[in-house]
Amino acid sequence: DLDPIEREKFMRHIYREMKRRKIEIVTTAPQYGRVVLQMSGEKEVAPTHFYVGGDVAVKSVAEFVGGCGAGRIYAGIQPNGDVIPCVFLPIIVGNLRKKTFQEVWERSPILKALRDRDKLEGFCRICPYRNVCGGCRARAYAYFNDILAPDPGCIYNIRYWKTVKEDILKKNSKLELVRA
């Protein structure tokens, strides 16, 4: 996983390349929406993982669907019928062999939590860009076992990244001591 500084530099680079070459950038990084806003002087937004635009309608869409869409605007369906909020988020929220997709979508407590950005923790909760970003819920889960935890991959959550990195280094040093 890239650290927040590397991720930030890369997203800024791909935005510049997109503008310079007139290419489309497809990304699953929710922070890209914030980067587009900041680098364009708030003239453009990236409401989805594959589009950047600047008119009023696009900005309204960005506020509604922008950022991490896990359980908010999409879900994954496994071959056995299991429904997960995102292909990167291995939490089963229902099964289509037992319930309809509509029942799972509307009643899952996990999906409801993912849709409520007031439940986000750390800086993600108060971030001025939370409606166009919201942090990666899969990364929060991977590092903190909590879908609402701060996304340690964001430059604004770098202190969480440092804590995670220290914890990983401690665990790895203990493993090396055990092996020796």
Image: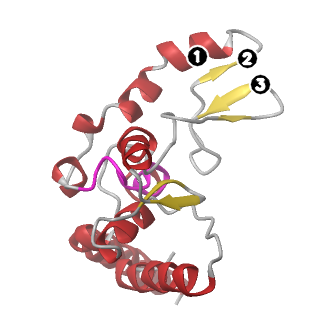
| Residue at the disc numbered 1 | 104
Amino acid at pointer 2: Leu
How far apart, in angstroms, are the residues tagged by discs 1 and 2? 8 Å
Check the image and name the residue furthest to the left: 126
Residue 132 part of the magenta segment? yes
Tag 1 secondary structure = helix
Sequence-wise, which precedes: disc 1 or disc 2? 2
Vertical placement of residue 73 versus 2, above or below? above
| Residue at the disc numbered 2 | 96
Left or right for 144, reference 95? left
Amino acid at pointer 3: Gly
Q: Are marks 2 and 3 in contact (CB under 8 Å)?
A: yes
Sequence-wise, which precedes: disc 3 or disc 1? 3
Tag 2 secondary structure = loop
Prevailing secondary structure of the magenta residues: loop
Image-quadrant location for residue 103 = top right
- Say which mark, if any, is on residue 136: none
Q: Position of residue 179 (x, y in %)?
A: 54, 84
Amino acid at pointer 1: Val
Chain part drawn in magenta: 129-140
| Residue at the disc numbered 3 | 81
Vertical placement of residue 95 versus 98, above or below? below
Residue in the picture at 42% in, 21% down: 109
Crowd tier of the residue under label 1, counting other residues whose Cα lies within 10 Å: few below 14, some 14–19, many 20 or above:
some
